Amino acid sequence: APNISLANVKAHLSQLQSIATANGGNRAHGRPGYLASANYVKGRLDAAGFTTTLQSFSYNGATGYNVIADWPGGDPGDVLMVGAHLDSVTAGPGINDNGSGSAAILETALEVSRQGLAPAKHLRFAWWGAEELGLRGSSYYVTNLSTTDRSKIKGYLNFDMVGSPNPGYFVYDGDNSDGVGSGPGPTGSAQLERVLQDYFTSIGVQTRGTDFDGRSDYGPFISRGIPAGGTFTGAEGVKTSAQASLWGGTAGQAFDSCYHRSCDTAGNVDDTALDRNADAIAYAVWTLATATPPA
Ligand code: PHE
Ligand code: ZN
Ligand code: ZN
Ligand code: ZN
C-alpha cells in the first residue's frame, strides 16, 4: 500500500480552514461553508476520474449534502465504502472534527487514482453532511438505498477525528475483544478491525478498542447489519496515565481540548497521528479492496 503524503493531507485541511474563515468561521450544516467544503472535495474527485454525486437532503429547514464518489471498476456486487463526515459544528471550523478524516480519505481516494488501482472490490468514498445534528447525511444515504444496493455494501470504514492533538490510537472494536461496552459489530467487522490493527502493529504503535457507541456515521450501517470499522484518536475524553505511557502526550488532558470549539483550527492537529492514520486508511483500502474473496 502507498504511503499517503502528510503534506497533501494538510493542504486539504488548509483549504477547509480557508473555506471556514471565508464563511463566518464554520462549515456547519445549512451554512455556506458546508456547501463550499462539499464543492472542494467534489472538484478534486471529479478531476481525478471519480464518478461523483452530490446527494441532497433536507434537515432542520436547510439543505444538506453528501458527496458520494465511485471509483470505476471492481465487482459491483462487492462494495467497500470509506466515509467521513464533512460538516463542522457552528462553533468553529471543525479541522480535527472532522476535516482530519475528510482530508485523509480524500487524499487516499486521490492516491487510488494516481496509482490507477484496479481493485477486485468496487470502491466508494463518502463525505457525509449533518453528522453533528444526528448522523443525518449517512442515515439518509443508507435509508434511501434499495434493499439490493444496500446488500452489495460488504463493508464500511469510518474516520471521524484522526488527528487529535493529544492523540490516542483507537480502532473500532468489531469483535468486542475487550468484552465491555456496546458489544461486537456485525459479522465481518472483526476482519476490518484486524486489518487496521495490522497496520499499526507494523509501525510499532499499539492500539486500543473503542466501542460502536453510535456516536458517528457507522451507526446507520451497523444497524442494517453491514460490517464496519475505522479509527479514532479521541475527542473530549481525558487521556489516562496508562494511555500516556502507551502513546505519549499528556495524561489528565482531553485527547482534543478544542473539541466542538472555535479553537478546532488548522493548528489543532497532531501531524504524527494524522500521518499514521492516513497511512492506515490506505493500507486498509489496498488490503481489503484488492483481496479476492476466498474460493
Ligand atoms: N462523532 C463525534 C462528533 O463528531 C465524535 C466521535 C467520533 C465520538 C468517534 C466518538 C467516536 O462530535
Ligand atoms: Zn463533532
Ligand atoms: Zn465528528
Ligand atoms: Zn477487538
Image (cartoon, grey):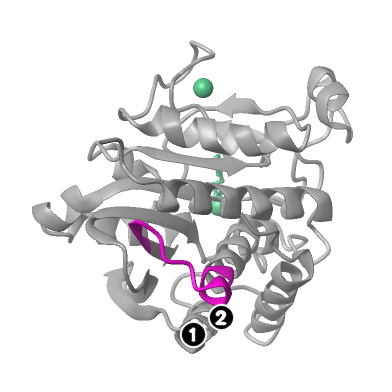
Q: Is residue 196 above or below residue 108?
A: above
Q: Residue at x 67, y 69 (%)?
A: 93
Quadrant in the rendering for residue 63: bottom left
Quadrant in the rendering for residue 227: top left
Position of 190 with respect to 278 (left or right) is: left
Q: Is residue 292 above or below residue 29?
A: above
The amino acid beneath tag 2 is Gly
Q: Please, what secondary structure does the residue beneath circle 2 have?
A: helix
Report x, y in % for residue 178: 54, 13
Q: Residue at x 82, y 50 (%)?
A: 272
Assess disc 2: are there few (<14), some (14-19) or many (≥20) residues with their C-alpha within 10 Å of its C-alpha.
many
Name the residue at the top extreme.
179
Range covered by the magenta-colored residues: 111-123
Q: Please, what secondary structure does the residue beneath circle 1 have?
A: helix
Q: Is residue 146 magenta?
A: no
The tag on residue 164 is none
Marks 2 and 1: CB-CB under 8 Å?
A: no
| Residue 162 visible in the current orientation | yes
Q: Nearer the viewer, residue 234 or 60?
A: 234
The amino acid beneath tag 1 is Asn
Residue identifier under label 1: 39
Whole-number angstrom distance, CA of label 2 to CA of label 1: 10 Å
The tag on residue 33 is 2
